[in-house]
Image: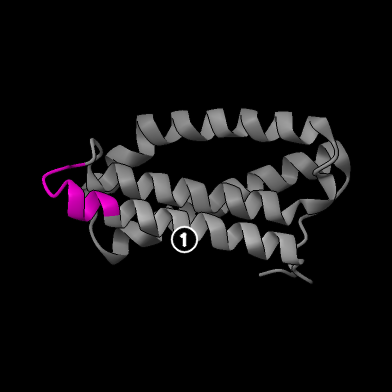
Amino acid sequence: MKTDRTALLWGTVIGVSLVAVIFVLAFEFPHFHMPLTSTEWDTLLVSGFFFGILVAAYRKLWKVPGFWALLLAFLGVHTALYWLLIEEVAEGLGGLRKDAFYGTVSGIEFVIFALIVARLYHRGPNIRFL
């Protein structure tokens, strides 16, 4: 997959901006603490990575509005599932077991999403980018 210059430029701008914000927070506000616990941060990062993979895997469906509606509905179900069940189970686990648990749940979610998309749009994920 070829990356164009605009994507590289925007990726660089966003990355430099994030690093600059982190440095400002670290040096100008040393007593600032985020209102999220480490488990909530883990859940947020896993969810962000998971939906980034979903969006990238179905690049050919980006122009279909129904795909984005399905993705938003799946995000709602994903968020409710994580708040009600997954985060509670993950708090009892630690280290590698928690990571393996998140990976297993994300894999199951990916398969469910792939089955729904295959049923609705007759298209599978493009996993060549992985």
Residue 105 in the figure: left or right of residue 28: right
**Compared to 2, does 42 lie above or below?**
above
Residue 30 part of the magenta segment? yes
Callout 1 crowding tier (Cα within 10 Å): few <14, some 14–19, many ≥20 = few
Q: Is residue 107 left or right of residue 114?
A: left
Q: Report if residue 57 lies within the magenta region.
A: no
Residue 23 or residue 66, whichever sits in front: 23
Quarter assignment of residue 98: bottom left
Q: Does 16 appear above or below 110?
A: below
Its colouring scheme is one colour
Q: Is residue 2 above or below residue 52?
A: below
* Quarter of image, res 97: bottom left
**Residue 87 x/y as whole percent:** 32, 40
Q: Residue 59 or 112: which is nearer the viewer?
A: 59
List x then y, in percent, for residue 15: 49, 60
How many discs mark residues in the rendered view? 1
Residue 16 in the figure: left or right of residue 114: left
Instruction: Name the side, left or right, on which 56 lies relative to 36.
Output: right
Identify the element where label 1 is drawn: helix
Q: What residue is rendered at 76% in x and 51% in y?
A: 58
Q: Residue furthest left?
A: 31
> On the rendered image, what quadrant is the C terminus found in?
bottom right
**Residue drawn at (57%, 46%), measured in percent from left and top?**
109
Quadrant hosting residue 88:
top left
Q: Position of residue 11 (x, y in %)?
A: 59, 60
What segment is highlighted magenta in the picture?
A: 24-33
Where, quadrant-wise, is the N terminus in this rendering?
Answer: bottom right
Question: Which amino acid is tagged 1?
Answer: Val
Residue 49, percent across and down? 52, 53
Residue behind mark 1:
16
Residue at 54% from the left image edge and 29% from the top image edge: 77
